[in-house]
Amino acid sequence: MEALTGGALYQNTMKIVEDAGKLVSLSPNVLERLKLPRRTLVVSVPVKMDDGRVKVFTGYRVQHNQTLGPFKGGIRYHQQVDLSEVAALAALMTFKNSLMNLPLGGAKGGVQVDPNKLSKAELESLTRRFTSEISPFIGPDKDIPAPDVGTDSQTMAWMLDTFSLESGFSQTGVVTGKPIEIGGSLGREAATGLGVIYATEKALEKLNKRLSDATLAIQGFGKVGMFAAIEGYAKGARVVAVSDVSGALYNERGLNIAELSRFVKEKKVIKDFPDAQAITNEELLLLSVDVLAPCALEGVIHAGNAKKVKAKIIVEGANGPTTRDADEILDGLGCMVVPDILANGGGVVVSYFEWVQDISWLFWTEDEVRNKLREVIYKSFDKVWAMSETSKVNMRTGAMATSLLRLERAMKLRGQAW
């Protein structure tokens, strides 16, 4: 598989920005400002391991742009994390938040570590030390981290506690994606996956189809893919394939996602789930389905396999799962690609809702959160569709153009682009 490296992801993202910028005659000064992050932080994170050794990990926090509001973006724990990847993801957060009409800028963070090889005590030590190293640069009104690949609500709880201890008082708004008991929002855990399904509903609507009549293949069964499968299944979609690190499952009649979720809760992986055929991750990407939702890592659909993709619609639950070369091939095949900055925006939208609830000390019901999320995703989809139809471009370029126009207006008003 020709997955994108961090550097390639950044170059890929900037090329999309340049293409969209040309479409809307973006100010060259604005484009120049958006090509590079405002601030990049690289820190050493020493951790005393359970065997008494001290091991030093490398951590990153990249703050790309804050024209629209405080920096916002997740923290990733993964062995392949590097500065280029984090910088690319920070830029994508800027564009995603702008597209979703949120009053937030873009940032991203990460630590180069395989979290599965650390004990819980080691993970806590790593998280607390990383938080201490970046604490001068984060805060409820400065930069608000959240979970990402390899992190979860427990990670956010440790970050919150460390930051609060150093500040002298509790500051629940410093992170989102927290446990409900300490200021988290109802509906946050499922938000990104649910957003994928809301985007899928709108995309199918354009093909005069309903979700309840559609077939879905979902690559990834983690925090995004699992909830996309659960929400799609609950709405009547036929989820015929899913995958995780242990492989992929296929059932033409549709998988019982409720039973599969219970199975994974006990076994941790989907492998050996009964009443399903084992296939490879690559085979899943090439199934003849209405909707393919890549919800794992970047660069899984590339020039080497795009010609074989049979899905009518690709809904990008992951960040950057489709390369620019693949986009051109998919356009030629007539495949609609709902881009990441639109399709996986549900997580940051509900993170914004959580932040608002924390700073106002007024919390919403789960139905309120879900309804508000649906409204944001639907409106954003409609804006992107209108831009794409009017300008005769694909949805990725349309989404980026829509995002850039809002950023340009704000930057000019603030005197950031002369």
Image (cartoon, grey):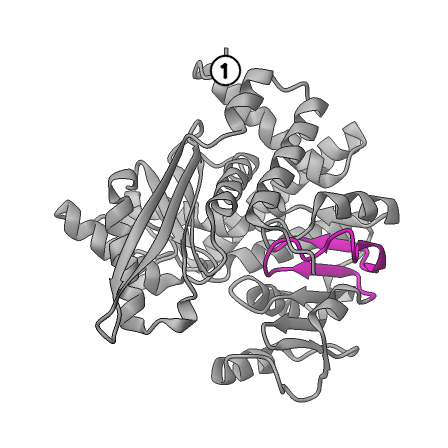
Comparing 15 with 148, the one in front is 15
Other residues around mark 1 within 10 Å, as few (<14) / some (14–19) / many (≥20): some
Task: Give residue 404's position: percent from left, percent from top.
Answer: 59, 28
Tell me: residue 169, above or below residue 191: above
Give yes or no for residue 253 being in the magenta stretch: no
**Can I make out residue 361 in this image?**
no
Q: Residue at x 55, y 84 (%)?
A: 263
Comparing 179 with 283, the one in front is 283
In the rendered view, does 129 fall on the left or right side of 357?
A: left
Comparing 53 with 381, the one in front is 53
Instruction: Tell me the residue that label 1 is attached to.
Output: 417
Task: Give residue 401's position: percent from left, percent from top.
Answer: 65, 30
Q: Residue at x 62, y 47 (%)?
A: 340
Q: Residue furthest left?
A: 168
Task: Give residue 177's position: percent from left, percent from top.
Answer: 39, 56
**Can I make out residue 160 in this image?**
yes
Task: Give residue 141's position: percent from left, percent from top.
Answer: 30, 36
| Start-end of magenta stretch | 288-317
- Quarter of the image for residue 327 reads top right
Give yes or no for residue 307 being in the magenta stretch: yes
